[in-house]
Amino acid sequence: LYDIINGLYGIHRSNIIHKDLHSGNIFINRGYAYVGDLGISKSATESGNDNENYGIIPYMAPEIFKGQKYTKASDIYSFGMIMWEVMTGRRPFWDRNHNTYLIIDICDGLRPPIVTNAPEGYIELMKECWHSNPEKRPQATNISRKIMEMNKNERGSSNNNPTEIIESSDIGPVTTYNLGAIYKSRPLSSMINSAMSLRSSRSQSISLEKLKRKFEDNLIEDNHDEGMKFCQLN
C-alpha cells in the first residue's frame, strides 16, 4: 500500500488524474508495487466534462456516477477500495452484479463490509478515502504518512503481537464465481445514465409518497379536531 500511494502521489504531484485506479493496474516487480496503465489519465487542470466514463464500477467514486468530473479525490476513493481489497483478500462487491443497481446503491452510500480487526488507524483511513464527499477525502501525501506510521507501529520492536486481521461474518465465503462481477475496465456512460434516471425516478416516487402520507395524516388530524369540537358542542 505504501508503494501504491507513493506512486499515486507522484502522479498527482505531476498534476495528473489516473481515472482508472484499481488492483488490476498495480504491477509488482522485485517486491515493489507500481501504479500503471495511465491510458485514460488526464491533466488535473483540464476543464470540461469527460465524454465517456470508463472503468470498473466498484472502484469508481460516487460523484462520477452523479455527473461530476474526475478529480484527484476520485483516485483517492479508488485507493480506499484497494485498501479494503488488501485487507480482506477479496475484490470489492465480488458478490454483486456490477450493474445499474450497484451504481445506485454506491451513490446512496453502500460500501463493502468492514472486517472486525485491523491495524490501528487502518479502517478509519480507509473510510476517509471512500467518503461520499470528495472534499473530505485525504490527499495522497497525508495517506502516505499515515500508512508509514502504521507500518512502523506494526513492525516496531515494542510490538510483539502484530494485528491479526479477523474477517467479518458479513463478508462470507466465496462459493461461486459471479459472472456479473466484471473487473475489466469498460465504457459505462450508458449504464450510468440509466442508473441515474432510475435513481431520480425512485427519489421522486418516495417524495410523492411522503407528501401523500403527510396529507393523509393532516386530514386525519383535522377530522379528529372537528370531531372533538362537535362532541364539545353537544
Image (tube, rainbow, N blue to C red):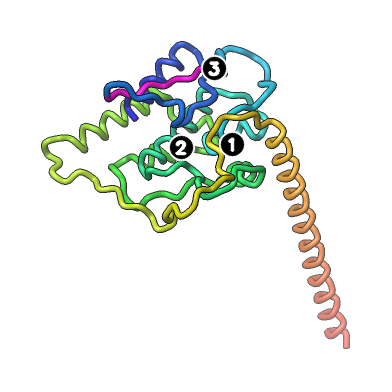
Q: To which quarter of the image does residue 52 belong?
A: top right
* Depicted 150 relative to depicted 214: above or below: above
- Image spot of residue 163 (x, y percent): 24, 45
- Image spot of residue 14 (x, y percent): 46, 11
Kind of residue indicated by mark 2: Met
Kind of residue indicated by mark 1: Pro
| Left/right of residue 69 with respect to residue 128 in the rendered view | right
Kind of residue indicated by mark 3: Gly
**SS of the residue at dot 1?**
helix
| Left/right of residue 89 with respect to residue 61 in the rendered view | left
Q: Which residue is mark 3?
A: 39
Q: Are marks 2 and 1 in contact (CB under 8 Å)?
A: no
Query: Marks 2 and 1, how far apart in space?
Result: 12 Å
In the rendered structure, does residue 137 fall within the stretch colored magenta?
Answer: no
- Image spot of residue 98 (x, y percent): 60, 42
- Image spot of residue 115 (x, y percent): 37, 50
* Depicted 199 relative to depicted 13: above or below: below
- Image point 77% across, 49% down: which residue? 204
Near mark 1 (Cα within 10 A), the count class, few <14, some 14-19 or many ≥20, is many
Query: Marks 1 and 3, how far apart in space?
Result: 22 Å
Q: Which residue is mark 2?
A: 81
Which residues, given as a range, are shown in magenta? 31-38
Q: To which quarter of the image does residue 146 belong?
A: top left
85 and 75: which is toward the camera:
85
The numbered disc on residue 62 is: 1
222 and 57: which is toward the camera:
57
- Image point 48% across, 32% down: which residue? 78
Nearer-N-terminus badge (2/1): 1
**SS of the residue at dot 3?**
loop
